[in-house]
Image: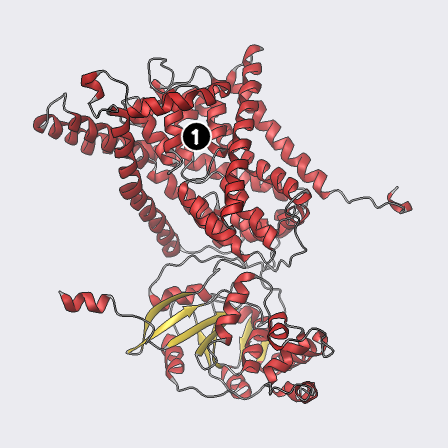
């Protein structure tokens, strides 16, 4: 027993490291996952990996610690995650490096390879051939002789070529030959001007104006700056390699005729809305609804009935233990668990969009708009990740090189409709709007985006003005990720959801149930008839929400519980109203005798908007505090509550006015949805207008 424990706690610092380095979108994380049997997130994005990941792998019988570094284009950083990688490489000068290149893009990928050779790194060049018909063919042996480092052909996804790669990794350290073009650069002219001895790599970085190097050497005025000369030398050499060792098809990698439609300035955004509409329909109203109903009935027939019978036999009808198990655990948790198929489908569709290369096109099409409101195309990735989980999405904001853009992107992410919020939309919206709830759900998702754009514009004009930012993005070819990849993504998200339900939701439901069923003197409310602790707290907070149209203590209590996790809102409502499945919840929301009910569609819409915007969950607050600091996290929370309250107040009064005119509520929903769409187009159109310049006749 002790031996097993000792092995499991064995530190990895004594295991020889191998660094995994490469451009974004070369298959780097795919190779890491394959070698280490991991399941790290893979995507066609610059910034998917924002910090190093390390895991031990078997290298032909020997253990090696593979360190996956963020994707970089050179050894000069353009963003936070690139600086993470470069600092790590520079601090491990004699560590073996697997430099992965994509065969289809090898001409460009080799720029990083040459930078590593300039540094004197011990490189193994792994050329990733992912496609059956690659655009390039390569003479591997000739290139290996030319560069003086091992060159190995691999397929990171299928795993072939790994034995040769591992053998190259096991070779002892050997200083690679300096690239031939360095002789043309006259680096000695730079070196002789420093009393401290510097190597070729440092001299090159001085000529490139690399800020960390200049700061390290105390250089304030750089008279040796000549970036063009360095770049020309590298790319002339790469061009000579291409002529001698490559056979190219002449096609542009990633280019597709579909892009003429998908990237059209007028069609790009409507197409994206249409894609989202199809995803939401399949998730919430078609396949997803059918699967969710089936799971709900299965849980009710099997676990629910069995548990209730068991509790009645053991504890009796009136026992608080019977109510705890049946209401808090089976009722509350079971209601949320029934959304498992829809959660899986939503993540699945988003994964397919990302793997296909479509989301990278969306980021490109949005760069112009986001750039004018102080964000970057990189922000698109973070905000879209927010549709899944705000907590993990905030982490990806660290790939912003501009501090203010990073703060803005992180603060705006909780306004997105994360997967934890959609059970609220589905259950409560369907109870009042039926099939038209699809417009409600899409409207809420788009409302979060509209609010974030407006807030970003306000931040940009006031306290968080951004600097110009670089945005490098590749268009991978449209491709299907494969069934294995899809099932892996599906399983990972289902597993995370089950872990969340099995830990956080169960414990929170038990706490909420105890507060709702015991008085301040700890007597069982059903027997004593006294006010519960939660009702006491709720009645203090309820008046705050009266102007929004939902001033009952049950609603106020559910919203407070939702700060821990948004799913708890629905499970709390299920417990308060004494029901065990989502269809029964919908029925009780119309009944004024229920602890949680809504008097009108206007109050429902107000509640849904407030649930979307009011506060991030606690885990997101913690991550925000770590990423952007306590000050901005606190400011962001205050702003978000104010925005949520005012937007819900406006929504309530708008829909109450619609009802006063006798317009059917469903028609009101459709009208509101159309207004949101038109608002988005108006905002986008305004942002895209060229600014006039004073004194220029052509603009007047």
Query: Dot 1: few (<14), some (14–19), or many (≥20) neighbours within 10 Å?
Result: many
Q: Quadrant of residue 329?
A: top left
Work out which quarter of the rendered image holds the N terminus and state it. bottom left
Towards the viewer: 421 or 685: 421
Q: Is residue 589 above or below residue 164?
A: above
Q: Is residue 157 above or below residue 395?
A: below
Q: Which residue is mark 1?
A: 425
Q: Is residue 230 above or below residue 174?
A: above
How many numbered tags mark residues here?
1
- The reply, left or right, for residue 315 in relation to residue 540 is left
Q: Residue furthest left?
A: 313
Towards the viewer: 620 or 232: 620
Work out which quarter of the rendered image holds the C terminus and state it. top right
Q: Is residue 258 visible?
A: no
Query: Tell me, what colour scheme is on the image?
Result: secondary structure
What kind of element bears circle 1? helix
Q: Residue shown at 61%/27% (left/top)?
A: 675
Task: Give the percent coordinates (x, y) of residue 651.
Answer: 55, 23
Q: Quadrant of residue 267?
A: top right
- The reply, left or right, for residue 229 in relation to residue 148 is right
Task: Give the percent coordinates (x, y) of residue 33.
Answer: 38, 64
Task: Give the percent coordinates (x, y) of residue 628.
Answer: 52, 51
Q: Is residue 27 visible?
A: yes
Task: Give the percent coordinates (x, y) of residue 64.
Answer: 34, 75
Q: Residue furthest front?
A: 521
Q: Residue shown at 67%/86% (left/top)?
A: 187
Towards the viewer: 627 or 650: 627
């Amino acid at each position: 027993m002790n031996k097993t424990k000792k092995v499991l706690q064995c530190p990895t610092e004594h295991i020889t490291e191998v660094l995994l380095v490469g451009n974004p979108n070369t298959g780097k994380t795919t190779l890491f996952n394959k070698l280490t049997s991991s399941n790290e997130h893979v995507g066609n994005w610059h910034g998917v990996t924002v910090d190093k990941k390390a895991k031990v792998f078997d290298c032909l019988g020997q253990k090696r610690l593979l360190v996956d570094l963020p994707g970089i284009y050179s050894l000069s950083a353009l963003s936070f995650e690139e600086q993470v990688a470069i600092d790590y490489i520079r601090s491990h000068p004699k560590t073996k490096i697997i430099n992965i290149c994509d065969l289809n893009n090898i001409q460009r990928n080799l720029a990083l390879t040459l930078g590593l050779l300039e540094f004197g790194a011990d490189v193994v060049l792994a050329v990733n051939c992912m496609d059956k018909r690659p655009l390039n063919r390569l003479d591997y042996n000739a290139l290996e002789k030319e560069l003086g480092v091992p060159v190995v052909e691999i397929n990171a996804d299928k795993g072939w070529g790994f034995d040769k790669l591992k053998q190259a990794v096991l070779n002892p350290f050997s200083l690679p030959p300096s690239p031939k073009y360095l002789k043309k650069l006259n680096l000695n002219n730079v070196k002789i001007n420093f009393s401290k001895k510097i190597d070729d790599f440092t001299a090159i970085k001085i000529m490139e104006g690399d800020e960390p190097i200049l700061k390290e050497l105390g250089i304030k005025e750089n008279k040796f700056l000549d970036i063009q000369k360095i770049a020309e030398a590298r790319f002339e050499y790469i061009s000579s390699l291409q002529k001698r060792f490559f056979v190219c098809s002449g096609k542009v990698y990633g280019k597709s005729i579909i892009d003429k439609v998908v990237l059209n300035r007028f069609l790009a955004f409507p197409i994206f809305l249409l894609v989202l509409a199809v995803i939401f329909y399949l998730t919430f109203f078609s396949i997803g609804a059918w699967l969710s109903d089936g799971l709900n009935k299965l849980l009710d027939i099997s676990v629910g009935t069995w548990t209730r019978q068991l509790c009645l036999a053991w504890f009796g009808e009136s026992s608080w233990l019977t109510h705890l198990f049946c209401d808090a655990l089976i009722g509350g948790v079971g209601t949320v668990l029934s959304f498992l198929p829809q959660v899986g489908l939503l993540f699945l569709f988003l994964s397919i969009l990302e793997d296909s290369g479509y989301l990278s096109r969306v980021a490109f099409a949005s760069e112009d708009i986001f750039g004018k409101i102080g964000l970057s195309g990189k922000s698109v990735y973070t905000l879209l990740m927010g549709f899944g989980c705000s907590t993990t999405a905030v982490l990806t904001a660290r790939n912003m090189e501009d501090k203010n853009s990073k703060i803005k992107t992180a603060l705006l992410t909780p306004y997105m409709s994360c997967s934890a919020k959609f059970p609220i939309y589905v259950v409560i919206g369907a109870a009042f709007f039926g099939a038209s709830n699809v417009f409600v759900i899409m409207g809420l998702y788009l409302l979060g985006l509209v609010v974030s754009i407006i807030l970003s514009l306000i931040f940009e004009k006031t306290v968080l003005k951004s600097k110009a930012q670089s945005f490098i993005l590749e268009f991978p070819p449209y491709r299907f990720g494969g069934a294995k990849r899809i099932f892996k993504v599906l399983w990972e998200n289902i597993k995370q959801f089950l872990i969340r339900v099995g830990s956080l939701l169960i414990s929170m439901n038990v706490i909420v149930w105890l507060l709702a069923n015991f008085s301040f003197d700890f007597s069982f409310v059903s027997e004593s008839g006294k006010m519960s602790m939660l009702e006491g707290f709720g009645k203090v907070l309820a008046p705050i929400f009266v102007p929004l149209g939902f001033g009952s203590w049950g609603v106020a209590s559910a919203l407070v519980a939702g700060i821990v996790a948004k799913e708890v809102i629905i499970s709390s409502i299920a417990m308060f109203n004494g029901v065990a499945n989502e269809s029964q919840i919908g029925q009780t929301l119309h009944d004024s005798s229920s602890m949680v009910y809504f008097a009108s569609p206007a109050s429902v819409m107000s509640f849904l908007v407030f649930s979307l915007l009011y506060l991030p969950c606690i885990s997101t607050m913690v991550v925000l505090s770590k990423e952007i600091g306590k000050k901005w996290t606190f400011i962001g929370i205050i702003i978000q509550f104010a925005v949520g309250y005012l937007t819900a107040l406006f929504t309530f009064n708008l829909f109450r006015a619609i009802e006063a005119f006798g317009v059917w509520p469903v028609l009101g929903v459709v009208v509101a949805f159309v207004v949101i769409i038109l608002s988005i187009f108006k905002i986008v159109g305004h942002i895209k207008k060229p600014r006039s310049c004073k004194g220029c006749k052509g603009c007047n």
